[in-house]
Image (cartoon, rainbow, N blue to C red):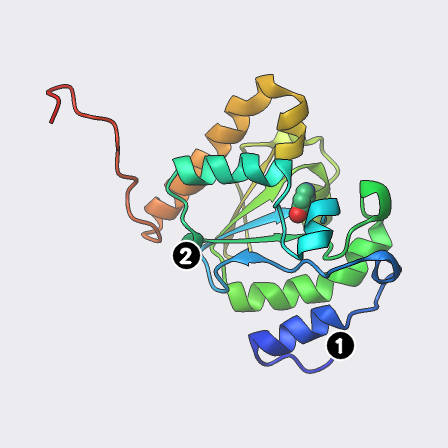
Amino acid sequence: MTDIRTWDDFLSACENCRACPLAETRDRVVVWRGSIQAPLMFIGEGPGAEEDRRGLPFVGAAGRLLDSALEALGLTEDLIHIANIVKCRPPGNRVPAEEEAKACRPLLAAQFRFVRPRVIVLLGATAYKYFTGQKDGITKVRGQWIEKGGYAILPTLHPAYILRNGREKPHLWEDLAAARAKLEELGLAPPLEENAPSPSGG
Ligand code: URA
């Protein structure tokens, strides 16, 4: 990989990357949305069709679900950075292969050095597996904090899974609320203001 000193160097390295076969079939390289530096980083699996077309992560149906939770929790753009295990769309939305995740890892590592998150939310089984190297089922490990390398890491369910299994939605909401609470605990986000009127009506 070329010498990456600035965020623009990093973006060029992503744009020019041909480290795995996904480069052959991608339309756009999908790197991030949110703030370049942010206390909370989300890691998904990989871009889908809409993301590949627009060059932004989580902008399809799953992304809209994620955004509605972020909005409800006051997780504004300055607090978050959203990325994926792989930056190029696996054809047919298949799960990225181990070699593809591995080929993408140096870029994700470089991304971490710019973003400098303290809290990381792993969205779904693929992000959990490739990020931690563990093979436990996501439904078993979701909601359980992992403290590693100075990061507080929280695996949770993938929003696309929630779209197919609506009954699981409270679990995703609960986990995202826990991530928000962790940011507050670390003094990295202001307390969430309650918009609901008080009982006195004031
Ligand atoms: N699913 C993901 O894991 N990532 C995206 O960017 C979109 C859908």
Q: Where does the C terminus fall, quadrant-wise?
A: top left
Mark 2, other Cα within 10 Å: few <14 / some 14–19 / many ≥20: some
Direction top: furthest residue = 167
Image-based side of 57 in relation to 197, left or right: right
Drawn side of residue 1 relative to residue 151, left or right: right
- Vertical placement of 87 versus 201: above or below? below
Residue tagged by mark 2?
A: 78
Which residue appears at 73% of the width and 53% of the height? 52
User: Of the numbered discs in the image, which one, if any, rests on residue 15?
Assistant: none
Please state the horizontal and vertical placement of residue 150, each as a whole percent of the image.
Answer: 50, 57
Res. 190 visible in picture: yes
Confirm or reject: label 2 Cβ below 8 Å from ligand 1. no
Q: Position of residue 130 (x, y in %)?
A: 73, 48
Residue extending farthest front? 53
> Ligand 1 shows up in which quadrant of the image?
top right
Q: Secondary structure at mark 2?
A: helix
Queried on whether the Cβ of the residue with tag 1 lies below 8 angstroms from ligand 1, the answer reads no
Q: Quadrant of the N terminus?
A: bottom right
Marks 2/1: CA–CA distance: 29 Å
Q: Nearer the viewer, residue 63 or 167?
A: 63
Residue in view at x 72 percent, y 70 percent? 15
Residue depicted at x 83% and y 67%: 19
Residue in front for this viewpoint, 21 or 107: 21
Label 1 neighbour load within 10 Å: few <14, some 14-19, many 20+: few
Kind of residue at disc 1: Met
Q: Is residue 32 left or right of residue 38?
A: right
Please report contact status of discs 2 and 1: CB closer than 8 Å, yes or no: no
Which residue corresponds to mark 1? 1
The image quadrant of residue 121 is top right
Q: Where residue 11 appears, x then y in whole percent?
A: 64, 71
The amino acid at mark 2 is: Asp
